[in-house]
Image (cartoon, coloured by chain):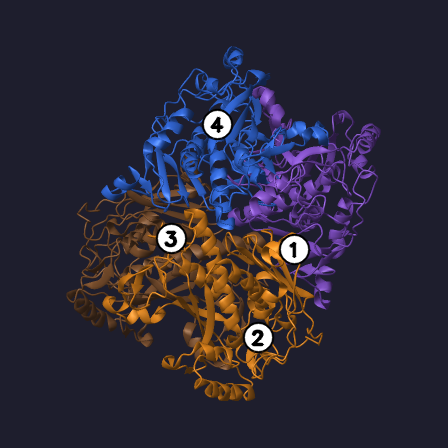
Chain colours: A blue, B purple, C brown, D orange
C-alpha cells in the first residue's frame, strides 16, 4: 500500500476524481493467458453501480469499462483460448464519468463537512477538488471493483462473496443465513426476514435527512493452506489494510474478531481432525488465517462502515477562512454507503488473495498440489 | 508491508526465531542527528519484557538491546548534540536470546496445536522451526518495540500510549479512565477498579490451564492534520495493517470503529468550531482520521487479541502424518498475550506515524507550521 | 522499479501497446499546488514525436495528451496560482494511438525478429501482442516523456537537457560543444560540424535497409548536494536503472564512466576549493555523484543505444513452431532509435531526480537551504 | 532499490559501518528447504576477503559469518535434506569487525577527500561516521557477498562467475580468455599473459601513492528464457541498478554495451537457428537480454570501477569549515578496488537473477519446463 497503489506481484493503481472526465486503474503483474473481456468486468461493476434503488445515490452512471491495454486476440489466440486473453503486461481500465452535474458548488467549496475528508485534504494539500468529493468520492471504488474482476480470474478455485450483516442498529439473525438471498434483495442481505426491517430503517433515515452505518461480511472459499507471509505481509494484515482503505471503513476483523477477546483458549482454538486433503477443522474462529497464513478454511472478514457524512441535517463546522458555519449537504448521496460497499469488499479481498497466491507460488513453487500429495 | 518489512521512507525489517541465537531489526531511513542511546530503546523493551509478573510467561529474558550500526559519536557530535546521534544510515538492533531452554520438543515437533500457526507454517513451507514457536513466537515483538523506540524520536511532539480496555469478558468502565493508572498496575489498565477483577479472572484462567483474550486501545496525541495519503496509503489502512500484523490480533478499529455502524450521520459527524491552530472538534468518532488523513485530533485505535493458543487443556488435533491426536502445550506461555501487547501496539503506531510524517514532509514540504500560519 | 512502475515517493506507472487504443501513465505522489496544463506536457511530447524528419519513423502520431485526473482549477485557484494546479492525487495521462495501421501482420506474427524482444516475450508469456511491437514498442516512451514533464516541475531550479554525442561510429568533437545547437538540428547534436556527417551516415544506413546505434548524454544542472541515498537507493543506481529501462539501451555511465577505469586516483579525484555556497570543484569526473549522493556539481550520464532491430536486411531466425526462417521487417521504423531517445533520457532523469528530491526532503527536512546557511 | 534494501520477492537489506562492531544483512523471501550452512556463505566471503595479497588493503578481517535466523535443523530435517535448511523466514547474517583500528582520525574527521563521498554524506546528513569510511566503506560489500551466496542457491542451474578484464589502461586479450585462470591469480584475470602486466602496473601505482581503476565482466550461464519483466522491472535495468550500487562503480553495460552504438543493425542482431530446447543464437550482442527479458543465452554484463579515492598523493580540498586544505589519505586502502569487486559483482548478479526467477515463477507459474515442452 503506498499512495494510490496496493499489492506486490499483482499491483493495482487507481486514479480519478468524482467529477473529472474519467476514473480508472492499472492492474500490473497479471498472469498471461487468462480470458478477459470487458463483460467479465462489467458484470461486477453493474453490481456496484449507483442509481439502482431508492436507497442509493440517484446519480446515473453507466460505469461502462474500457480495457485500454494488456489484452490481445487474434485467430491463433481465439483457437487456443476461445477469445481475448491477458498478455502479462499492464491492464489499463477506464470508466468515463458521464453524470457529473456541473452545478454550483459555492456552498461547499470553502466549507468543511463534519465527518468528511474536506478538512483533512485541505490541511494536507492546501488545495482540493471538492466537486462531488473529488478523490474522496465513493466513485473511486468503481476502479477497485474493476480491478477485483481481474483478480478473481487469477486465483484458481477461489470464490468470494460478501453480505451485509448489519445496517444501523439492526443486525441479521445468522441462523437464517442464506447466500442465495444476497442476490435477490438490494441490500446483499442473507437474512430474508431482515430486508423489511432495513427498508423501514432506511426510509426513516432518508426522510430525516440522515444516514446510517453498516457492517459487511466477506467469505473466500477455496483458498488453500499456505497463502500469506510472516510477519508484516500477513494475509490478515494485508486484508486489514485493503478493507480499511475503503471509503468510510472504520473497523476490520478476521474470523471471531473482537469477540475473540472474550473467549477462552479452549473455545477459540479450532480443533482439527484428519481429512483427505489435510486437516479438517471443527470450527473457524480463526477466519481461515493463523500466523498470517491461510489454513485451508474459508477466509472470513468483516468491515464496519460509518454513516455517510454528507447529510441534509445541519451540522456545526468551520470554513477555510476559519469562520464558524452550519453545513447541510444537498446533492445526490447514499444514505448508507455500506450497501454499495459489498462488491467493493469482495473486490479488495480478491485482489489481496490473488497477490498472495502469486507471491506464494513465487517463493515456494506452489503448483496447486496440496501438502502431502507431492 | 512485505514479508518481514514494513514502512516506506522509514522501513523496519525484523528477523529472528524464539530459540535462535538472537532476534533483531534494521530500521532504515531514520533522519540524521537524532540523539539515540541504547537506554532510549531499553526503557521500552523493559515495559514489554516477559518474566515480570504472575500472569506472563516465566521465561527470563533480559532483552538487552545492542545498537550495531547507524549511530555515531565523537567530541564534535557530543558538543553539538549532547551525545550519540543517528547518522541517517540503517540502524541495526540485536537482542540475544538467553533463556531459550533446549528441552525436548518431541511432543510438539510433529503436532499442530489448534489455534496456532503450526499447521499453516507447515502447509506453506514444508519445514518449520517449532522450538518456542519459532518465527511465530511473541518474542518477535521485542524487535517491534525496539524499532518503535526509534520511531518515537522521529515525529516531533507526538506522544503515544496504550491501555488494556478488556480482558476476557471484563471491559473497563471508561468513565473511570485514568492514564496514570496504566503505569502502576501490571495490566496497563486505566481503570483502577478493574485491576482486581482482571487478577481474579486471570487466576481462574491460569488454574484452569486455559487462556483469555484482550482488547488494547492506543492513542496518539499531537499528530497534526495532514498525515497519511489517499487512497491505499491511508493512515488508518496502514495502522490497520501494522496492528493486525501483531501476533494474535484478530480485529482493528479506528475511533468509533464497529460501533459507528449503528450510529446516525448526525451523531457520527464530529462537529467543528474555530480554534487558534485550526478547527476544534466537539467529538472524536473519527479517531483522528478522515479520508485516510489525520485531522489534528488524537489518533485512536483498538486491537482485539485472541486467547493464547498454547494451553494445558487438551485439544483434538492432527500431526504431520495426518494422525488424529490430542494436544496440550506444556512450557512457559502467557495466559493472556494481550497484556504484553500494549507496548507492541504503541510501537507499531509510532512506526506508522513516523513514516507518515516523513512521507508527508517529502511530498508537501511540510515543516511543522500549521495550515494558515505560513 | 517493479514491473511497469518506478519511483518511490514520486511513482510512475505506464501502460499501453503500440497498436492498442491508447497508452498512458499514472504519476502518483506529485506535490500539490504546481501549475500544470496539458501544454506543459505537450511541449516535451512534441520534441519526442515521430514523423518529424527523414530519419525517424513515418508513423504520424499527434501524441495529444489528456490529463484525466489529479488537477483542479476554480476561480480561487486561478486567483492564487494563475491557473490549473496539481492536487496531490494521482495524475492520469492518456495519449491515443491514431495512426496504428491495421495492416496484415501475418509475416511477423509467428516469427522472432533477431535482436528484438519477440522471442523473449513469447518465452515469458506464451502469448504476445506483436502488432507494432506491442508493449515493446518505442511508443511506450511517450508515456515516460509525459511523466517527465511533470517531474520537471517538482525539483526547483533543476534544468535537464540531453544531446546525442555519437551516431554509429561517428562521435562528436566535444571541444565544439554548443547546447544551442541541440535545438536547431534534428539530431539533438551539440556539434554543428557533425550534423552533416550524421546525415550522410543515416542516408547510407537507410538505403542499405540497415540501422545504427547512438549514444546520448544528459546533464542536470542545479541539483544541490545531498540527493540520493546509500547504498542501494544511490542516485546513480536509480539513474542507471531508469536509463537502462529505455528501449534499446545497452549501457549507462556516470561522469567519466568506463574511462574512469583507465585513470589514476590523482586524475580522477575532483579537487575542491572553497566557494560561497559550498565546495567548488575543479573537475567533474564523478558526474556530480559520490557515494550515490549528489555533490552539487552537474549530474552527467551517458546511455548507449543499440541499432534498431527491425531492419529490411534479411536475417536468419526461427518461428514459434521452431522452423528456421529468414526475417526482414517491413513497416515504419526508426533507423536510429537513439535520436528520439534524447527527450526520453531527459524525462527519465527528471523523474529520478524529482523522486530523490522528495525523499531527501522527507528524510532530512531539507528545505532548499544549502548546508552551512541554516 | 530503496535506501539500503533491494529486490522484490527476494529482498536484501544490509547494514553496518566500517568501524562499527559488525555489519550484516537480512535476506527475506528465500524459498524454504534449501540446504544452508555457514560454510556455504564463507567460501564466497573468503574470495572477497581483504588482506589476501600485496595489492589489497592490509586490514586483516577474518569475515566470519554467523547465521542468526531463518534456518533449522533437527533429526527429521537431516534425514530429509541432509542438514540444516532454510525455513522461508528472514535469514539474518552478521560479520563482526575485528581489525578496525581505533587510531586517531583527526586528520580526516573534518576534511573532505576529493573523489570520496565525505562531502556528499556531510551535505546530506550533516553528521557522518568518518572512521574507515563509515557506511561508504567497501566493507559493506561483504554483506552483499554473503547475501549472494544464498541467492546462488535459489535459481536452479544458474552458474555465475566474474573476471577482471581491465586494470588501469591495460585490457586483456579476449582471445586468450580462460576461466580457469581466474581462480589461480589474485586478480580474477582470465588472460594468463596479462597477470604480469597488471602486477607491474599495480606496483608502480602503489609506489606512487596512487590508485587505479578496473573493469569487471560477469557471466551467468544457465539462465532460461523468460526472466525479467517489462518495462521498468527489466532484467537489465535491475542488473544496472544492482551493479551501479557497488562502491566506486561508474558504468554498467550489457552484452555489446557501449560498442553497440557503433554497430549496424545486421551486425548487432543475434541470428537464431532451431535447437532442441528453443532457439540457438549465433552471437550474443544482446548479452542474453532482449526487451528486459532473458533469452536463454548467457547473461553478460560489465562494470567500470573508478580508482580508489583514498590516495597518498596530496590533493586540494576543503574542510567542514570551508577552509582550503590539502588532503592525503594514510591508512590501509586498496590501490585498486576493482580487484575485490569481482566477487561482489557476482553476488549482486546472483541476487538479481534469483529475485527475477521467483517473480517469474510467481506471475507465470513457471516450473522449469522450457517453452514448448509443456
Q: SS of the residue at dot 4?
A: strand
The residue singled out by tag 4 in the image is A161
First along the sequence among labels 2 and 1: 1
Percent of width and height locating residue B178? 78, 32
The residue shown at (22%, 63%) is C316
Q: SS of the residue at dot 3?
A: loop
Q: CA distance from mark 2 to mark 1?
A: 48 Å
Q: Nearer the viewer, mark 4 or mark 2?
A: 4
Q: Nearer the viewer, mark 2 or mark 1?
A: 1
Q: Is residue B320 left or right of residue A163?
A: right
Kindly indicate whether the residue at mark 4 contacts the one at mark 1 (C-beta within 8 angstroms): no
Q: Is residue B372 visible?
A: no
Residue A74, by quadrant, is top left
Q: Identify the image quadrant of the C terminus of chain C.
A: bottom right
Label 1 marks which chain's residue? D
Q: Is residue A263 left or right of residue B238?
A: right
The residue singled out by tag 1 in the image is D73
Q: Identify the image quadrant of the N terminus of chain C.
A: bottom left
Q: CA distance from mark 4 to mark 3?
A: 33 Å
First along the sequence among labels 1 and 3: 1
Q: Nearer the viewer, residue A149 or A51?
A: A149
First along the sequence among labels 2 and 3: 2
Farthest residue, direction left: C207
Q: Nearer the viewer, residue A73 or B83?
A: A73
Label 2 marks which chain's residue? D
Dots 4 and 3 on the same chain:
no
- Count how many numbered circles sit on residues in the image: 4
Amino acid at each position: 500500500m503506498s499512495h494510490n497503489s496496493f499489492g506486490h506481484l499483482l499491483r493495482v493503481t487507481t486514479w480519478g476524481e468524482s467529477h473529472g472526465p474519467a476514473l480508472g486503474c492499472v492492474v500490473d503483474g497479471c498472469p498471461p493467458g487468462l480470458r478477459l473481456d470487458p463483460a467479465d468486468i462489467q458484470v461486477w461493476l453493474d453490481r456496484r453501480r449507483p442509481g439502482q434503488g431508492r436507497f442509493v445515490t440517484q446519480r446515473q452512471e453507466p460505469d461502462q469499462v474500457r480495457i485500454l491495454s494488456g489484452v490481445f486476440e487474434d485467430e491463433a489466440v481465439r483457437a487456443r483460448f476461445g477469445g481475448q486473453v491477458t498478455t502479462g503486461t499492464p491492464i489499463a481500465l477506464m470508466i468515463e464519468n458521464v453524470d457529473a452535474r456541473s452545478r454550483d458548488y459555492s456552498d461547499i467549496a470553502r466549507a468543511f463537512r463534519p465527518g468528511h475528508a474536506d478538512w483533512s485534504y485541505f490541511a494536507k494539500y492546501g488545495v482540493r477538488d471538492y466537486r462531488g468529493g473529488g478523490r474522496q468520492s465513493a466513485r473511486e471504488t468503481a476502479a477497485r471493483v474493476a480491478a477485483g474482476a481481474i483478480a478473481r480470474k487469477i486465483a484458481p478455485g477461489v470464490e468470494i462473496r460478501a453480505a451485509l450483516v448489519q445496517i444501523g442498529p439492526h443486525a441479521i439473525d445468522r441462523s437464517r443465513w442464506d447466500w442465495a438471498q444476497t442476490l435477490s434483495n438490494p441490500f446483499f442481505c442473507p437474512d430474508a426476514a431482515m430486508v423489511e426491517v432495513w427498508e423501514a430503517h432506511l426510509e426513516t433515515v432518508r426522510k430525516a435527512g440522515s444516514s446510517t452505518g453498516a457492517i459487511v461480511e466477506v467469505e473466500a472459499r477455496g483458498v488453500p493452506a499456505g497463502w500469506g507471509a510472516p510477519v508484516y505481509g500477513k494475509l490478515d494484515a494485508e486484508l486489514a489494510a485493503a478493507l480499511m482503505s475503503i471509503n468510510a471503513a472504520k473497523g476490520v476483523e478476521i474470523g471471531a474478531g473482537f469477540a475473540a477477546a472474550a473467549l477462552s483458549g479452549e473455545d477459540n482454538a479450532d480443533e482439527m481432525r484428519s481429512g483427505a486433503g489435510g486437516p479438517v477443522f471443527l470450527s473457524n474462529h480463526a477466519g481461515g488465517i493463523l500466523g498470517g497464513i491461510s489454513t485451508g478454511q474459508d477466509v472470513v472478514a468483516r468491515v464496519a462502515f460509518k454513516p455517510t457524512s454528507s447529510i441534509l441535517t445541519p451540522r456545526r463546522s468551520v470554513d477555510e477562512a476559519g469562520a464558524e458555519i452550519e453545513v447541510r449537504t444537498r446533492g445526490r448521496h447514499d444514505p448508507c454507503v455500506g450497501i454499495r460497499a459489498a462488491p467493493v469488499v469482495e473486490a479488495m479481498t480478491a485482489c489481496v488473495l490473488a497477490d498472495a497466491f502469486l507471491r506464494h507460488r513465487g517463493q515456494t513453487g506452489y503448483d496447486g498440489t496440496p501438502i502431502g500429495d507431492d
